[in-house]
Amino acid sequence: MPSGETMNEGMRNVNDAQPHTHTPPRIPQKPLLQRHILMTHNVNTAMLRRNGSPVNSTNLPDPKPILADFNAQDLNSIRFSAYRTACKLIYIQKRTALNLLDLVNITEISRQTGLDGYDLAAEVDVGRLRSICRTMYGQLNQRLTSLNNVDVEQCTEWLLYWLLMAYDTSSTGSVRIFSVKVALVVLCKGKLEDKMIYIFGLLSGSDGTASPYLLDNFLHSVLQLPRACGEGPSFSYSPTTYTDCFPTGADQPLLLDAFIDHLLGVEPGPPPIVWLILMHSITEAQTVRHNVHCNSCHRNNFNGFRYKCQQCPNYQSCQECFWKGKVNGRHTLEHEMKETSSTYVS
C-alpha cells in the first residue's frame, strides 16, 4: 500500500475481499515464448542437458520445508494476502542470499555461464542449474569479506529447491531459462523499475515492442512465485489477469514506456502483481526508523511502515502489529488506519 493511503483493518486485500467466481484455467507448465522456436526448442534443451541424457533424480536438491519455514517465521499470520506474499518472498530472498546480489550481478552471471546464448524457451536441467548457482555464489563471496561469506552449497541447494518448486511442477528436473531469469531478477536487490526494464528487454523484438503473447508469458512466470509460497488462491493466473495488467487489450504490442506505466505508473499497481510492488516498498521501508511508541506492543523506535489510527487520538502501530491484528485499549480492527513510511509525526 503506498505511503499515505488509507485502509480499514477489518478489510483484506482486494484479492481476498473479492473471491474468484470462476475456476481459473489450467496454466500450461512451460508455454513457449515464441511460436517460431518450436522446432529449435528440443535442440536447445538437449544441448543444455548433460550429454543429452535424462535427468538423474539423485541430482535433485534435498527437499527443504519452505512452507514450514513460513509458519516458523509466523508469516502466515499476516492478515493481508499481498503483504503476506511480499513478506514470504522477502524471506526467500534473504534465505537464498539473493538480497546480496544486484541486477548487474545477475546479468553478468547469465552472460558468463552462457545462458544468454540460448533461446529463452530452452530448458536448463538441475545439474547445469546447480553449477550456475555455485558460480554465482562463489563470485558473491569474492566480493564479500571472509566474515560475511555465504555458504555456497547451502544457498545453492535452497535456491535450486525453490526454483524447482516454483517452475517444475511436473517434476521433470528442468526449468525454462526465461523462468530462471524472471525469478532471479525479481528476487535480487534493486529498484523494481530497473528490473522491469531488464525483463522488457528480454521480451521485446527488434522493433522495440513486446507482443501480447510474450507479455502473457511473463505474467504466467511471475505469478508462479506467489503460487510457490502457498498464495495461489489470491494471485493465480486468471482470464482477466492480462487485461488487469495491460488494459490496452490482448492484441496491442507495447513499447517500454507503456509497459512500465501499466505496471508501475499508478499506485498501488495492478491487483495481480500488487505483491511485487509491495515487496519492494516493504524492503525500502525497513531503512526508515520511527522514533515513536507502538500503542499495540508498546515497543519504542521501530523500523518499517507506521500505521496511525484515524479515529483514536495518537494511536499508532508498528507494521507487525497492524499486519497481524494486534490491538490495545479502545482501538479495534474496524478502525481506519493510515500507512506511512515517513518519520514525520502529525
Image (cartoon, rainbow, N blue to C red):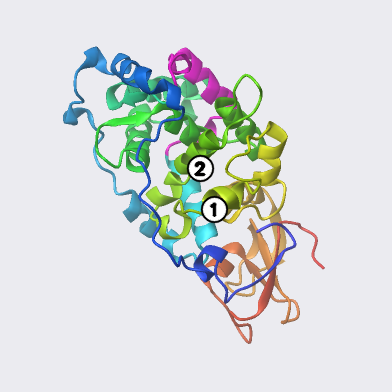
Q: Is residue 97 magenta?
A: yes
Going 51% across and 40% down the picture, which residue do you hit? 216
Which residue matches tag 2? 219
Going 47% across and 46% down the picture, which residue do you hit? 223
Residue 161 appears in the figure:
yes
Seen from the viewer's position, the closer of residues 132 and 244 is 244
Seen from the viewer's position, the closer of residues 228 and 260 is 260
- Total residue callouts: 2
Give the main secondary structure, helix, strand or loop, of the magenta stretch: helix
Query: In the rendered structure, are the residues bearing label 1 and label 2 in contact, judged by CB atoms less than 8 Å apart?
Result: yes
Q: Which mark is residue 272?
A: 1
Answer with left or right where residue 318 lies relative to residue 77.
right
Answer with left or right where residue 310 lies relative to residue 49.
right
Instruction: State which tag comes first along the sequence, 1 or 2.
Output: 2
Q: How packed is label 1: few (under 14 Cα within 10 Å), some, or many (20 or more)?
A: many
Q: Which residues are magenta?
A: 96-119
Q: Is residue 45 magenta?
A: no
